[in-house]
Amino acid sequence: MDTEAQPTERDRSSRPSDPGAIPDPEGPEDRSRFAFTARTADWLPGGRISLTLLICLLFLLLLNFFVVKPFQIPSGSMENGLRIGDRVLVNRLAYRFGAEPRRGDIVVFDGTGYFGHADYIKRVVGVGGDRVVCCDEEGRIQVNGRPVDESTFLYPGDSPSTVPFDVVVPEGTLFVLGDHRSDSRDSRDHLGSPGGGMVPVDVVIGRADWIAWPFAHLTRLHRPSGYARVPEASTEPDPAGAHG
């Protein structure tokens, strides 16, 4: 009679593993993901190349919708800095986490109901509470009583404005002008319209940060130093009132 104990299922499962066996570097989840990717690639015409292109396209669409939006300059209103056909990258997140547009920023906004049925690109000259006046004795625009040096971006030969104005910018809105003042339809052209030519911050799509194309124009768009010395808006009421 064979008295040697037969190994039970538990005994066999508790035996030490074969020291010569190579462990599987992929866990069940890794194998499942790989299998899913392989099945998806097999389903698509072109296989893995098509899948890679599809993923890249999806990434670009998400980037365009949430982070960066390309915008083509349609007119000469922002020359010489931005020329017709230039493509700028608009930072959609610039004003999404508590930040507000600042004087000197170049912004893209939806002009529907304010300027026209299109997107526009202009420079912020006044923000909520600012008093913007044109022009002083030397022909300069003043913001909160301080003249602004626009020589670094104003189109050569243009004056700051041939249209006089004296406005106080309501809170939550912007007063915007093109850099090529003689070829720009901006806040000055809508002073007598509903809204007084002001652009609500809510319709701002984002801030133009880069010229991306053509490659010869590639550059970062900086806020001009001419606005650095502009004081904050006075909280006291203006006895002269706003005009325009």
Image: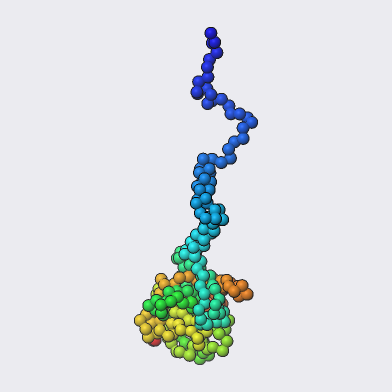
Q: Is residue 183 above or below residue 218?
A: below
- Residue at 54% x, 10% y is 2
**Outermost residue to the right:** 20
Residue closer to the observer: 64 or 207: 64
**Outermost residue to the front:** 45
> Could you say which quadrant of the image residue 15 lies in?
top right
Residue 218 % position (x, y) = 60, 73
**Outermost residue to the top:** 1
Viewport quadrant of the C terminus: bottom left
Residue 147 % position (x, y) = 51, 84
Residue 185 % position (x, y) = 46, 84
Q: In this view, does 51 lie above or below 217?
A: above
- Residue at 48% x, 84% y is 184
> Is residue 112 shown left or right of residue 154?
left
- Residue at 51% x, 66% y is 68
Camera sees residue 172:
yes
> Is residue 160 shown left or right of residue 244?
right
Camera sees residue 234:
no
Residue 92 % position (x, y) = 48, 67
